[in-house]
Amino acid sequence: MKGEEKETTETSISERTPAVPENGCEEKETDEQGEGNAQDGEEMKHPERSCAEETHVEDSDEQQQHVTENTEEETTECGGKQDLSAPGSTESISENSSGEIAEQEGDQSLHVRMPPESPDEMVSSAFVPLRLACKTRQTQIMEPALDTLQRLIAHGYLRGSTNGIKEDGLCYETINLVCQCYDVPDEAIELKVLRVLLTLVTSSTFQVHNEALLHVIRTCYNIYLGSKSEVNRSTAKASLIQMITIVFKRMEADSSSIPIETVVVAKMLPPEDFGDEKQPFTNFVQNFINRIVADAEGTFYSAPPVTIHDDAFQGAKVFGDLVSNKGGSTGELNPKGEKKIVDTEKEPVDLSGATALQHDAFLVFRSLCKLAARDPNTPTDPYLLKGKVLALELLKILLENAGVEFVENEIFVQAMKEHLCLALLKNCSTDSKEVVKVLNYIFATICLKFRAKLKNEIGVFYPIIVLKQLEDFSGTRVPYWHRLVVVHCLQKVCADAQTLVDLFVNYDCDLESVNLFDRTVLALIQLVQGLSYSPEVAEMVPAQAKLIRNEAMKCLVLILQSLLAWPSEEGGCDKPSQNAEKGSTVGEISSDNDAYQSMPEGLQENENGRKSPTKEDAGTPLHRSTSNLETREIEKRRAHKLGYEAGIALFNGTPLKGMKTLQESGYVGKSPAEVALFLQTTSGLEKSKIGEYLGDHTEECVAVMHAYVDSLDFTGTTFDAAIRNFLSGFRLPGEAQKIDRLMEKFAERYYTCNPGSFRSADVAYVLSYSVIMLNTDAHNPQVKNKMSREDFIKNNRGIDDGEDLDQEFLKDLYDQIVRNEIKMRSDTRRPQAGRRPGPAGVDAIMNLLPGRRAHPSFEAMPDDVIRSIREKMEGKSDSTFYVATNYENMKPMLEAIWAPLLAAFSMLLEDSIDEFVTRSSLQGFRAVIGLSATLYMQTVRDTFVSALSRFTYMRTPEMMMPKHVDVFKTLLEVAEEYGNLLESSWMYVLESVSYFEYIHQQVNGMSDASLFSPEHLEALSPKEEGHGGSKYFKRLSRKGSLSTPHAVPGIAVATLDSLDPGRANSGLIPQGLPPPGVLDFVEASEVDRLFASSGNLSSDAIVHFVEALCMISQREIASHHTPRVFSLTKIVEISQFNMNRIRIVWSRVWTVLGPYFAEVGCHPNLSVALYAVDSLRQLAMKFLERDELANYTFQDDFLRPFVLIMRKSKSVEIRELVIRCVSQMVLARVSNIKSGWKSMFMVFTTAAADSEKGIVQLAFETIEKVVREYFMYVTETEVNTFTDCVNCLIAFTSTRYSPDVSLNAIAFLRFCALKLAEGEIGNIEHADQDGNPERAAISGPLFSEKEAHMFFWFPLLAGLSELTFDPRPEIRHSALEVLFDILNYHGLHFTEGFWERVFSSVLLPMFDHVRAEITDATTFEDSARRAEIDAWLYETCNDCLGHVLSLYSKFQPFLKQVFPQVISLLVGFVRRPHERLAAIGMHSYLSLLQQSSSQFDDKEWQMVLTALQEAAADTLPDIAILTEPHGRRVSEENPGSAANHRKYRDLTTGAGSRKLAEVKTRTKTQLLIVSSISQIYGGSFLEIPSKYVDVLLDVVNSCAAHARKVNSDTVLRARVIEAQEESKLSAAAVLPDPPLQQLEDEASHAYLSILMHALAVEKTEGASSIWKDANVEERLVQFSMLVLDNFLPKEEEKGAEVALVTARTPLVVAVLRALLSFAEEEFKTHLSELMPILTHLIEAEYSPSEVTKAVSEVLVGRMGKLVVEELV
């Protein structure tokens, strides 16, 4: 079958279609030629003859001379004979009047107007002698005949169309005639034939189709194979390229009338064909092609459509003219010239809808594929090699220049799947260098241009063609040249990012596909890291390793760079280029000469050192109907596959756990059959782990094992084959029990499938064990004494139910096992590092591929392997090709490869000193950083940048080499190029820059570390050391260190990942210096450019840049011994470079710089802190140069560090410097300061509380100048700064070091209030006039309780209010004066609501502190505090209350709503248990009534008197609290002590003392209330509404009654006396007895006086009925009876109450005399009640004389009259 196929194939390609004989002679001649061609079964007669003869030629000089002579002859011939249109030609044909054809003189582009009809009889007649001349086989006759024939065709005389059938007439004969001329073994004739054939194909008037076209191409093909002339072979090859190009260009354009593109011979032919010494050959071939194309263009015109015979397309489906399957088809020409194709395996390609041009292209493409797939006659057939290489080269060029129609048309897609893939498969196992080179480049082109249509095919071929060669890391199976070719071709794929991304999306993210991208990168990394070669090639290791490593490095760099450049190419592959629509343009037919080169030169680099992929590298954009996959879906698919691979890896470690994970994740079903199928079909599973899982004793594993074995079919299989099949899928476990279970199940399955093989399954069980033992014994090298055949037979005696098995069977079994070891399938392929588990099928197919042979051969791939591969390509259900268009799709790609890339690049940078390796590694670092930064993969970016930073060796400069300087320069370039995306990675860049600056200074013998070190400060002169901070600052300024950021060069020290953690606080200064001259490769301008270009960073990037720079600077100054300021200097520089950024960006930047300067400004090293503050001053001055609009706060933000430094710094010099800096800014930029006033006032506020008097004075000088001269700027645009100014002034009023400053500050507050009241503070929305006539005279705004108004007034008023507690009298009085002056002067500008807020928030709170703490009942531990309170109480409280009452009296119409608060304040004072405070309260209470009672209404009177009544009730003294029993526990240590026998609380200390003081204080308060009521009634009774008189009476009566009750309680009095005696009080501290006698007397007298006065008023004419309603008379009678009744003691109290009687005598006398004021009727009315009491008073033994006398007067005055009246 195979030989038959081979013969048929060769016949189809090589046979020459015989010409139509016109006589017997011609036919006989043709037959003779045919017999000669058929001698060896090949129809390429002359190629064999030429090559055979050439083999025996040994004199190369003679060959060269022969070629040169032929070349000269042909050159002359071409120049003199072929161009009929050349000037001076003797041949001239003119057009006559009848329209005959004529040729005009002119150049090569002669245009000939041809008639529309067919060639006339003249052309037919001229053809006859030409045919006869060619039949002569005489060179001298044939040459002019062929020249003439070529001219007739070129100039359009001989025109028409042929499909290769006899019916085409003259055209058919012409082709046959020319092709037959090739039989003449002459080099000149070969060139003539090539000329005519190329003219036929290029001509637009003579169209060649179908079999005719194949005949032409076949002839050129044979000339290339059989010609002895090197020039002829090259010309034939170039002609073939030109022909195929024309055929496919016409197909793309669907027209035969298109401009012909001339191929560039130097690009199309390999370098070995044309070197520098063979340049004339190149020129000759190029001229040959150019001249023929020029002739074709000269006859170009719009010809009528060529008629194609319908029968050329009969039989709708055509499979081709060559056999593609073994024995499955036969081909022969039918009588009409049609090809009959019979295919037994596949459906032929459907050409029913194809055009003639598409049909031609299809036939050519199919023929080339079949030529490339031909099987050889012998394993070393040289002709087959040449033919294969030529066919593959033509296919390569065809595919590289394929246009849209070829890529998209389903005809050609199917042709590629059927024929091209078969050709690739046939050549995959060849060892020919030429075939391997072209094959790999064809596959690269397929990946670049046809991946969308050949998804499944690429998935199968890629591992075979690429991965199989790259992943064989032993170096023994794959020659290094083969791997080198693969790597070189892979560079084309790597240069196209769209291809890489598509490969990743469609294969690495597909669970059923191999990880193409991932495995490719890992394999390349392994090549980069080095190969281990076998001993037989050891002598070539260094050169080979370097060569392959360098090319692999190029691939890796190309991958990264192309991915990085992908999005910048206008959306990647989504936008097709112009060439994609038109095909290749003129002069751009692409063919990669590198396919023929042994090794490419270096990568072409641009000025930045990066390779710029060319258009040719990128390939033609895909035109496809594919699916766009969303980024999330890609990530999901990738994660799904990674989970699957992780499950496989877990299974290979712990099978049970791994299988459980796979099942839980849904990768494997739960049923035993599904698990068994998974174990059988999944690659990547370790066979030993499969055996371990199947042999496990668990129920699930046993069920899976049974399903696994049951799935195997052993029917009709020998025992040897069955056990081999069984053990091929796993390795037997080591435990005997596991092996036993497996063998037992195997025996059972084998016996079930073959029931007659043994008597029972036990036989198979025992025999299987015996086979396993034999296999181990025979093939284990450690076993010395091997088991013999007899031993094996002996071991198996009696196992068949006591009988022996057939000895022949056992002998044969023994021989099979010994001869062929039982192996697992995986044993045929060595495990490879870096391989991830993939889908079943591909790796298994790769294992079946033939291995490498010792000598090159052309052995074809086995048919079963081809069949398996094709089934794999066609078996995948999902062939949808997903196109990645989103840049985010590269994230999972980079995630998969960044770690191994980092390891590879790091290893090369660390170990290699090769310049190319270093440069490539740095390019890789650069590309990965760019990718990760663009994709926002922070971890990857930071890792690579930090690694690059470490490889600068700046931390260990003594180990630096020039390559480390290159690393540093690359780091700078990365920062400059990707600065907008570095974010936190800036830290590593700036860290290295900082190290470099320090090292550079050390090399130059200078360092600022010494300038800022403590040793340097100690070296100052004693005079300078003794100066204050300001003079030290002036000294530095004179030296220039603070006037410019460049004054003190800095050095960097800090790092995030220091090599020495113990030096974290030591500045991390690198020790040692680099070798001489190493740093000369870095210009200082390169480092400076990094900072100068910061102005080009984005808004986010500049923030990250500043953050990193600040962190580095903080670490630079971290050392107390050697701080440096390099980064601090650069911060000032970059701030100046970025000064023009918008404010919103600067606000973000300053959120970083502000805290940084605040921290550095407080540095313990004074020089560093001074430097930082001055740097901050420079920036602030720059910022203040820019105007700021209203309501912005940027000035406040950038000045805030001054505030923080002022608050936190412990250095006097720093604080003084801050004040001077701020003062300088105020004086220099006062007109530009807007929101900055807030921070400035905060600085001065902080200075006001400073402990240094000089700082306070310095700050207040500036504030004074601001208020006096620049106050209008303070609130010009930002009115809120007014409150900051006020708060600042209030702070200065509290300073303890200068009373003058405090008093001046208070005076400035008065000024501020004046400005505020006049409405000069901003544009405040003022309140509307309320129509009050008292406001009519005022001018200016009216202020209400709105927050906007209170915002300005409250801080000022509250601040002055707080000053009333200042311990300094002059400050208290001045503040009090200013406060109330402001309120009095501007009070009319305040609304009622405003006044209410003033009272509640400013005035009344002044007394809160005093009301809360001042009490006579409190024991103050701090005598100083007590003195302070007393001073305020006696000196200020009265004044404050007086001013408050004056304010109320003056603005009473506006203060109605605050009256309750005022009354509450006063009564609150009365309620306090403090004698002085109560007195002040009552005094103020009376003052309020005196000043304002005339304007009180009823509500206010009620409020006043009710408050007084409540105060009287609350202040009643409770004498009983002094007699509370002693509550202390009895002391166990000293039970006999006096304290343990005490009955009452001790009244000298603690709570007892406070209670005694409280009783005394309340008693005095009651006396004040009684006295005040008397004054109120005596001074204001006319104004008091009469209805409230009873309130006063009730208050006084309650006080008297309480006192009377206490005084009358003899038991209580006795207990009080006892308690006082027990406490041993001093005489001054003892309460009188009775204790409230004074209160009783005064209250009773006051009550009696009011009653008497009220009674008198009531009796006046016109007295109000209210007085009568008050029952004054009744009150008086009751009071009198009560007093008189209680005067004399009871019988039991006589003798004990003499003192009480004496005390009450004046009251009794007053009451008795009051009775005389009664009218006679009234007295008579109450006589019955009074008479017994009066009688008792007279009878009383102890009644005083005064009482007796008063009683007598009553009796005489009243009773006498009554008696007389009764008598009368």
Image: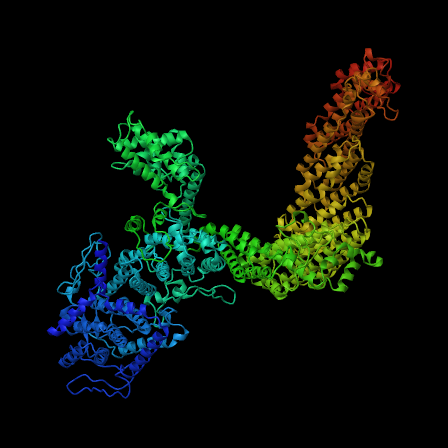
Q: Position of residue 996 (x, y in %)?
A: 64, 59
Residue 1323 seen in the current view: no
Q: Position of residue 51 (x, y in %)?
A: 29, 68
Residue 345 seen in the current view: yes
> For the point 42% across and 31% down, which residue is it?
735
> Which of the two residues, 298 or 76, is positioned nearer the viewer here?
76
Identify the image quadrant of residue 271. bottom left
Q: Position of residue 975 (x, y in %)?
A: 56, 59
Q: Is residue 1573 left or right of residue 271?
A: right
Task: Quadrant for the C terminus, please.
Answer: top right
Looking at the image, is 28 positioned above or below residue 564?
below
Looking at the image, is 329 positioned above or below residue 754?
below
Q: Is residue 1429 left or right of residue 334?
A: right
Looking at the image, is 1235 positioned above or below residue 1557?
below
Identify the image quadrant of residue 1607. top right
Q: Position of residue 1105 (x, y in %)?
A: 59, 57
> For the point 32% across and 39% down, which residue is it?
815
Q: Is residue 1099 left or right of residue 1283?
A: left
Identify the image quadrant of residue 1107. bottom right
- Farthest top residue in view: 1692
> Which of the two residues, 1760 or 59, is positioned nearer the viewer here?
59
